[in-house]
């Protein structure tokens, strides 16, 4: 038994130092090679990583870019949408999903999510489709896939594009009703991901990528990411942006891609450990695994159902136990994104914003650390009864 009152080592929301220490020789060699080559932008390292990620995901095209937000923006730019076109997205997500829509003068239409897996509710999407709807952006939140099979069918029926925000679920697989499966990010017309350091496949700076099975869309994405330059240098066919993954980041990612499945296993083991520690705690709902996806646990997110989520957060903060509220405010209540004509309050999103709390989740967590963290959570919840 561990001592419940002494934290076993320094606790982190994400332990990037520990993860680096475990693969340091490989990372250092890869970095040294890039520095030696002095090819910092583009070049064979970036191309090799893109190829390896294509193989891993079983997708025709991976187009690297500067970050996950750019990936979403470039994806929407490639679809040829017009200002005022409507894009449906979940109200319970990181701001980037809505930001790019607004930036392109498209209209974000926010819909409610499922209380179990926190992902977009396809039945609610159906209700929000209008003649101006052009695209849907499902987010694979916290590490498991939104329900893509009925969503793709709905999109097909209405002639809509689907852009997956896969910043949080790279490596997860979606299972179809016929038993086949596909990797998250390769199901919609375009998938987008982020290599932000704390993501499941993180680099040591900023990075992102787009993926698609469609050759024409792939050309469009590449062109837009490279200043709108097509196949001929210094000829610019469309207005683009400058968004590239640099070679140092690609070299790091190429090493870490080999560990991605092991990292997912470590996260799932950690989640199972937390789950058993929280078994039978009435005030908590543990993460629900949906039947159509595996879970890569970008976050381990509990729901605190007794109204004391904020008090629990304060308690853990005071004890130096890292935790976070993803996300405290529905998108439609954010000043920048509140619809002009007033917003419709979405009940599940509202409830989740009041109840969720995410605990430390990473590849280096020890059972003793999780026992300590869980012990403190349970100690607090038992106190007020
Ligand atoms: C991290 C994240 C993004 C943005 O990625 P960046 O690389 O930080 O730009 C977009 N959507 C979701 C859901 C994210 O978690």
Image (spheres, rainbow, N blue to C red):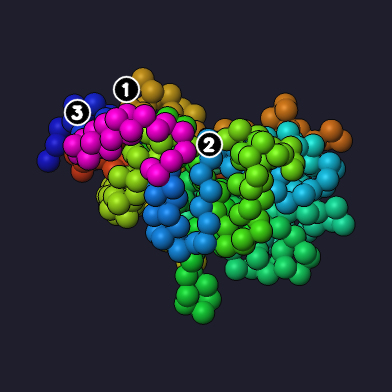
Res 148 label = none
Residue 311 seen anywhere in this rendered image of the structure: yes
The response on whether ligand 1 sits within 8 Å of label 2 is no
The quadrant where residue 211 appears: bottom right
Residue shown at 50%/61% (left/top)? Answer: 59
Q: Secondary structure at mark 3?
A: loop
Q: Nearer the viewer, residue 374 or 324?
A: 324
Res 319 label = 1
Separation of marks 2 and 3 at Cα, in angstroms:
38 Å
Q: Position of residue 189 (x, y in %)?
A: 64, 59
Q: Position of residue 302 (x, y in %)?
A: 44, 44
Q: Position of residue 357 (x, y in %)?
A: 46, 37
Magenta span: chief secondary structure: helix
Q: Tell me the crowding category of disc 1: few under 14, some 14 to 19, or many 20 or more residues within 10 angstroms, Cα based.
A: few
Q: Which residues are magenta?
A: 22-45
Q: Position of residue 22 (x, y in %)?
A: 20, 39
Name the residue beneath numbered marker 3: 9
Q: Quadrant of the N terminus?
A: top left
Q: In the displayed structure, does residue 264 sit left or right of residue 235?
A: left
Residue at the far top in the pictured view: 318
Res 244 label = 2
Sequence-first disc among 2 and 3? 3
Q: Tell me the crowding category of disc 3: few under 14, some 14 to 19, or many 20 or more residues within 10 angstroms, Cα based.
A: few
Separation of marks 3 and 1 at Cα, in angstroms:
13 Å
Q: In the rendered structure, are the residues bearing label 1 and label 2 in contact, judged by CB atoms less than 8 Å apart?
A: no
Q: Nearer the viewer, residue 262 or 325?
A: 262
Q: Secondary structure at mark 2?
A: loop
Nearer to us of marks 2 and 3 is 2
């Amino acid at each position: 038994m561990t001592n419940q009152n002494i934290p076993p080592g320094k606790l982190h929301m994400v332990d990037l130092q520990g993860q680096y220490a475990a693969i340091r020789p490989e990372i250092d060699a890869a970095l040294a090679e890039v520095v030696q080559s002095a090819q910092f932008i583009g070049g064979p390292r970036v191309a090799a990583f893109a190829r390896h990620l294509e193989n891993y995901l079983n997708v025709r095209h991976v187009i690297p870019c500067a970050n996950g937000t750019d990936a979403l923006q470039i994806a929407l730019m490639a679809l040829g949408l017009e200002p005022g076109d409507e894009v449906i997205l979940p109200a319970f997500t990181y701001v980037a999903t809505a930001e790019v829509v607004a930036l392109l003068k498209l209209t974000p239409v926010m819909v409610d999510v499922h209380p179990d897996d926190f992902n977009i509710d396809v039945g609610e999407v159906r209700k929000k489709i209008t003649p101006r709807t052009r695209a849907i952006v499902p987010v694979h939140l916290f590490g498991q896939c939104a329900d893509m099979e009925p969503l793709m069918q709905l999109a097909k029926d209405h002639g809509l594009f689907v852009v997956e925000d896969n910043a949080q679920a790279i490596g997860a697989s979606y299972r179809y009703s016929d038993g086949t499966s596909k990797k998250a990010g390769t199901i919609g017309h375009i998938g987008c991901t982020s290599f932000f350091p704390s993501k499941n496949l993180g680099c040591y700076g900023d990075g992102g990528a787009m993926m698609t099975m469609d050759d024409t869309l792939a050309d469009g994405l590449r062109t837009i990411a490279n200043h709108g330059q097509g196949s001929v240098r210094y000829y610019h066919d469309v207005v683009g942006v400058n968004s590239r993954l640099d070679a140092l980041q690609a070299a790091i990612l190429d090493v870490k891609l080999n560990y991605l499945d092991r990292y997912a296993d470590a996260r799932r083991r950690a989640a199972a450990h937390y789950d058993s520690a929280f078994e039978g705690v009435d005030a908590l709902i543990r993460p629900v695994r949906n039947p159509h996806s595996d879970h890569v646990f970008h976050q381990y997110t509990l729901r605190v159902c007794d109204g004391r989520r904020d008090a629990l957060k304060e308690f853990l903060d005071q004890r130096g136990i890292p935790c976070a509220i993803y996300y405290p405010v529905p998108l439609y209540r954010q000043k920048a994104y509140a619809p002009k004509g007033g917003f419709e309050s979405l009940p599940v999103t509202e409830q989740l914003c009041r109840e969720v709390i995410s605990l430390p989740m990473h590849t280096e967590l020890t059972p003793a650390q999780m026992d300590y963290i869980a012990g403190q959570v349970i100690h607090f919840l038992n106190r007020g009864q």
